[in-house]
Amino acid sequence: MRLSVSLSLAVVAVTLFAFALKAQSAAPQVVAQTPPMGWNSWNYFAERVDDKGVRAAADQIVSTGMKDAGYIYVNIDDTWEGERDANGLLHTNSKFPDMKALADYVHSKGLKIGIYSGPGTKTCGHYAASLGHEEQDAKMYADWGIDYLKYDLCSFFPDVMQKQAPTDRAAQMRLMHDAYVKMGNGLKATGRPIVFSLCQYGWDSVWEWAPALGGNLWRTTGDITPRWDRVYAILEQQAGLEKYAGPGHWNDPDMLEVGNGKLSLDENRAHFSMWAMLAAPLLAGNDLTSMKPEVKAILMNRDVIAIDQDALGKQGSRIYSDGEVEVWTRQLSGGALAVAVLNAGSDRYSTHPFHLSLAQLGLHGAQQGKDLWTGKDVELTDNMPLEIASHAVLLVRIAEPK
Ligand code: GLA
């Protein structure tokens, strides 16, 4: 009797264990628990991206140490697409002879690979997009081993929204929403964990509805360019969006321009610092094969990356601005605090330094911190005068704010 009871108990235990295992494997894997980090082809290469360039980027991510610093996604943006065949299957164009082989190559480096499409007939670069082929395309991405999809509105606006609802803005927005639901479902149906990145420039307060349809990040604005005024204009549009970000779902103020165009060193540092304060995806957008050491040092500043990737996942807030200087804080895990003082205007030196109000940040008395760009310890005191060059930032991590 006793033997048969323990035998049945054993059977029950084994069955429960098997169920638990099955449930575990069926549950969708979580992605983007911290803001995605990696590289994207668009900002530097645009339509010049090809198989060779993507392999080179993957190689560089490993050899520069960027992979070890957290840059994992190698994302192909627009212009990889060819034509659809009689079965509706989309082929790559001649720049990408074998996408599966490319994905295998990127994976062999311990990296992940991303791709690009949109809900309209055409992408922004006038290549074939996914309208009417959403499930088929999602399945093809999964078959290739794709890990990340950026889905860009573009021609869906004229093709569908304006055509089907020429005068009804609300109906247009519903069409847009449904188009993102459709691809979100297509991706889910593959069973493969694929980061879903919405790109529709922040229309219709996308941050309010993207997480529910499986969006892991969503662009909050139009395109970035490698110019300080554009970087700053985008930053200005992020204040107030912080409550919508968190593990698995992030505001996306667009990819990095660090190392591109004519951004000065201070501007590159300020751009990178503020994107970290925003818990923004960190997708480098420069040519990694010809990266200057000072640009590499910015992209690989581990302390700043740690702010971006902080496990709490709380996006920073602009606490106050005074003239052209802005003071932002970001709460970090373990009770730490990041403080960024950004001078968006002209130089502030000893003739007219900026005076930092700790009281306005809710801090009391002197604070011990680390300056994340000099690597040195600093003490912040209330009303202290700060000299900050034009477009430069003071970024401090306070481990135990008081
Ligand atoms: C849009 C997007 C960009 C880029 C291009 C590609 O402009 O916002 O980030 O993907 O399309 O054509």
Image: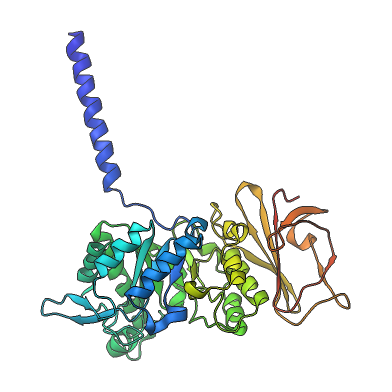
Res 99 seen here: yes
| Rendered location of residue 367, percent (x, y) | 78, 53
The residue lying furthest to the top in this view is 1
Q: Is residue 278 left or right of residue 55?
A: right
The residue lying furthest to the right in this view is 351
Q: Foreground residue, 258 or 8?
A: 258
Res 239 seen here: no
Residue at coordinates 46% horizontally, 76% vertically from top-left?
202
Q: Foreground residue, 68 or 26?
A: 68
Q: Foreground residue, 369 or 297?
A: 297
Q: Is residue 361 left or right of residue 6?
A: right
Colour scheme of the rendered structure = rainbow
The residue lying furthest to the left in this view is 86
Q: Is residue 199 left or right of residue 23?
A: right
Give the image quadrant in which the ligand numbered 1 is located: bottom left
Relative height, residue 339 to residue 50 (above, below) = above
| Rendered location of residue 172, percent (x, y) | 34, 83
Relative height, residue 247 to residue 388 (above, below) = above
| Rendered location of residue 321, percent (x, y) | 72, 73
User: Tag count in the figure?
Assistant: 0
Residue at coordinates 17% horizontally, 13% vertically from top-left?
4
Q: Quadrant of residue 3?
A: top left
Q: Quadrant of the N terminus?
A: top left
Q: Is residue 155 left or right of residue 312?
A: left
Q: Quadrant of residue 342?
A: bottom right
